[in-house]
Amino acid sequence: MNHTPLSFNLDITAPTAKRVPVVTKIHGDELVDDYAWLREKQNPKVLSYLNAENTYFEAAMEPTKELQAKLYEEMLGRIKEDDQSVPYPKNGWLYYHRTVKGQSYPIRCRKKNNRSKEFVLLDQNELAVGKAFYSIGALEVSPDNKLLAYTTDETGYRQYKLHVKNLETGAVTENLMERVDSVEWAADSKTLFVIQEHEVTKRSFQLFRLTLGESEPVLVMQEDDSLFDLYLTKTQDEKYLVFGGHSKEENDVYVLETETPNAEPKLIFARKPKERFSLEHNADRFYVRTDKDAKNFRIISTPVSAPDQWTEVVPHDPQVRINNFLVLKDHIVLGDRQNGLPGIRVVDLKSGEIQRLQFKDAAYSVSIGANAEFETSKLRYTYSSAVKPLETIELDLETGKKKILKRTETPGFDSKQYRTERVWVTAKDGCKVPMGLVYRKDLKKKAMPTLLYAYGSYGMSATFGFSPNIISLLDRGFIYAVGQIRGGGDMGEEWYDAGKMANKMNTFTDFIACADFLVKSKRTDRKKLAIMGGSAGGLLVGAVVNLRPNLCKAALAMVPFVDVINTMLDETLPLTTSEFNEWGNPKIEEQYRWIRAYSPYENIRNVSYPTMLVVTSLNDSQVSYHEPAKYVAKMRAVRSDDTPVLFKCRMDGGHGGASGRYDYLKDVAMQYAFTLTALETV
């Protein structure tokens, strides 16, 4: 394809942040932070600086405006704008959401059957009128089907307010509680259990019982250990509320029968080091997923009356990690991961037989879908691959028959033109790391532009699902690669452990090995390689370009966690204390040394770096805007070359970016336009 050559507009000067040195003395080191003042969110000088960065960004990207518009139209053209999800049954109703052309948000609906009149639960488009950002969190219909509890965030800070809508009259009781996390109904349809966050740290630390129209919320539980957050769920059969405190490595489990919301909670599993439990219920037994004596988890059952009497249901398998499970009346469904790929197993509770579903693609994504009923033999799951749009499939667990309920329409896409491939990369220490690739079949596959993505933290696994957006790169001759690096859960819990705490450096060297493989196999070369990651994946990008500045031509860091030491030293910031078990606590010297070796902000050097795009949001509660702002200021000041470092700060939006689907596509178009321009492929 012929493209008009593009370059960034660099005729203007990038903003320069003033230096106000702040010295931190720790474990014999002196860390000088010249840009700590950028944390002062209410300081007019900070907002002025961020606005100047946005002005510079827009000017630098001006030559790409036409390309951005073209990419946006391409991606929009692959979406069916008027669409509807597959309705799923729950408590006598069919629930679904639909989208309307020109409207940014989904409309949540229900109907009694496929032929009956539609009832709109919430039209997010109406609620979002006049608001730059609008997100719905919890969405729970009462057991009597008459009330809807839902939470909303209007800033992107993920600070949700609780509302209850009367579905018969349409009346809404607003702002029942602030800073709401999880919400569940008791069986009486008037009692809500609500988890509330701490007003400063955002740690989920209090569980309340809220009786509508009667009284102030009653505190049921408070979690005082700063390493722990509270969680709240309900069993699939809706007989029990399940809650307790959890950290990255352990939790306790309390239950409360939904029929008796005022009763005292019952402790089922006490908190013990390195033991995790998640609980479901069926008849007179609890079914439990646990890693006690089972690194990759197993399923056990216990009598409700004697939870210490364990019976093995699905034994531990060191090669297969059980990620989640669904308990139905006659079956247990397991979502697991084996050899880096997701899977589904079905356990017949009558016979004990275990069956694994089979999938043919080299790399794919499969997950248990919307299954809201308990007494059913029908399982919903979704399946896609990098070359196959999402399918919603219903499996009859009694007969084994499958029915495709929906294939997502992708106008203009022909799957026969694309290919997926899975390769194994040898890491620095000899470990074999899987990586997935997708590209056009007519690609010559030699020195082609490539975008390499990875995450590699929190035990989260890479996915190989379908993205209609990435087609715009593939059709321009790109290879898109996803590394399943250590720190993720792709190959089980040991894979996760091998990329966190003292072992975190493996995450970065694995990613470097993936990039080197792409170059050494002549699929690409350094000047045509871009790397990308977001959040903890942005930490990955920041660490990698310090370790190997010549690894690639362009680097994209989205909402990047790059100021690790300063953030982990500040226990007033959201997430800090709960993540001591992920990164380490820098107040402990050994753990400080781990972090000091890779923290992107401290390790910027006077060398040549790739062309960089860094994106953040002013109201991001997970990675504060000042981390990437400080990082960009220091990167420009310290690096030895004048290769562009572009920085965009969304003045509305949150960790996930824009809330509306059209604004989201514009963001992706901007990222792709940057990549194409930086790699000089347009």
Image: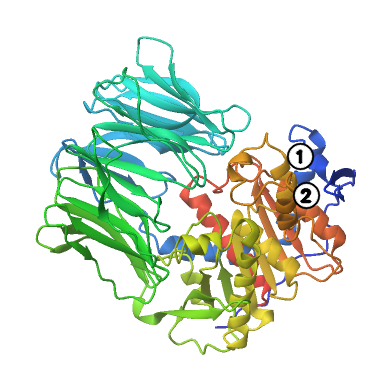
Q: Give the mark nearer the N terminus: 2 vs 1.
A: 1
Residue occupying image coordinates x 68% and y 70%: 554
Residue occupying image coordinates x 42% and y 67%: 464
Q: Which amino acid does label 1 sit on?
A: Arg
Quarter of the image that includes the N terminus: bottom right
Q: Which amino acid does label 2 sit on?
A: Lys
The label number, if any, that marks residue 137 in the structure image? none
Marks 2 and 1 close (CB-CB < 8 Å): yes
> x%, y% of residue 591?
70, 52
Q: Callout 2: few (<14), some (14-19), or many (20+) C-alpha neighbours within 10 Å? A: many
**471 or 528: which is nearer to us?**
528
Q: Callout 1: few (<14), some (14-19), or many (20+) C-alpha neighbours within 10 Å? A: some
Quarter of the image that includes the C terminus: bottom right
Label 2: element kind: helix
> x%, y% of residue 383?
31, 63
CA–CA distance between discs 2 and 1? 9 Å
Residue 449: which quarter of the image?
A: bottom right
Q: In this view, does 262 lie to the left or right of 329?
A: right
- Per the image, the residue denoted by label 1 is 39
Asked whether residue 599 appears in the rendered view, the answer is: no
> x%, y% of residue 482?
51, 70
Label 1: element kind: helix
As drawn, 87 above or below 64: above
> x%, y% of residue 27?
82, 48
As drawn, 424 above or below 153: below
- Per the image, the residue denoted by label 2 is 630
Asked whether residue 463 appears in the rendered view, the answer is: yes
